[in-house]
Amino acid sequence: MKTIRLIYPQWQGGDIARWIPEIGDPAEAARGYCLGARLLNVLAPDCGQETYTVPVTTDFKPRQVLDGVLDRDDIASQTRAAMDILKVVAPDKIVTLGGECSVSVVPFTYLAGKYEGDVAMVWIDAHPDITLPGDVYAGYHAMAVTACMGLGDRKILAELPAKFDPSRILFVGLRDWERDEIKARQQQYGIRHLTPEEAAADGDLLREWLRLCGASRVVVHFDMDVLDPAEIVAAVGVVPGGMKMEEVVRVMEIIAQEKEIVGLTVAEPMPRVAVRLREMLARLPLLQDSASK
């Protein structure tokens, strides 16, 4: 079984600068996901896996909404580049370090295709990420789950090899729907969820869902905004009442006991302090880029 590490520093899916006021430069705030992905790669244990990096442009040009998706063409191009890597390397398991939430879409749909649909998806997140093009928020990271379901922008979806049935998707730690229409959409799709309190309980609800999901393999998405900001602020989202770090680890352990995990994504890291320090260091004597003088 070949396991690879995929560094996927995609940032264009988020429209998040206004939520990080301590970072004054909107471009630096938006591209904070890039630094976050690199830091995750440094922090995650070195397991000897082959490592591949998805090429992601860091050019900060005027941002455009096309067909209801912010920076759609950059995202479609990077989606194709990520899929090209996986087609050539042909891994059996993938660890993805992002980047905003949409970095799960390519590896998860690749794995769903590889295993001919015998894959369920556990999405550990404060938000359900089931918006669609044309909704009031055009950030693609909030459309990640619907994209995995085969719903959304046709140009992006054309690059994806498979999709997930909503009956094989479980949200864990969900606590912020943001708008009533999103809560209604989840009910329409029939996607189950566990609240942070339910996820922190004895694990029986999670085990029951895993045993009944109809798949022998699982992919797991871990959005760092599921974590309780009272314990740690690691992402853009800081909605109170989230999961503790130990609770997230225990959820992962339960999944691994019940099923074979073939995909794991860690997404939405926003290293606010590191971004601010980088800005400061760039202004110090002998550290300034000579081209900027």
Image: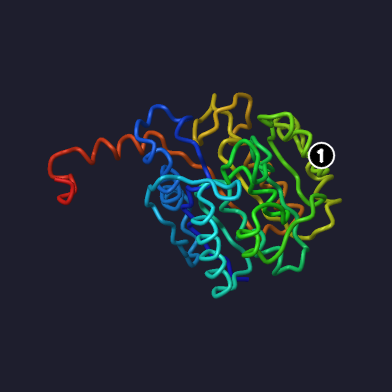
Q: In the visual, does 171 lie left or right of 232? A: right
The secondary structure type at the circle numbered 1 is helix
Q: Using the image, determine if residue 281 lies above or below residue 77.
A: above
Disc 1: which residue: 205
Q: Quadrant of residue 92?
A: bottom right
| Coordinates of residue 167 in the picture (x, y in percent) | 82, 50
Hey, which residue is sitting farthest bottom in the picture? 88
- In the drawing, does residue 51 fall left or right of residue 195? left
Q: How many marks?
A: 1
The percent coordinates of residue 197 (x first, y second) are: 72, 29
Residue 222: give x, y in percent of width and height: 61, 45
Q: Nearer the viewer, residue 71 or 228?
A: 71
Q: Left or right? Give the position of 128 relative to 211.
A: left
The residue nearer to you, when weighing 170 against 150, is: 150
Q: Residue at x 50, y 39 (%)?
A: 15
Q: Quadrant of the N terminus?
A: bottom right
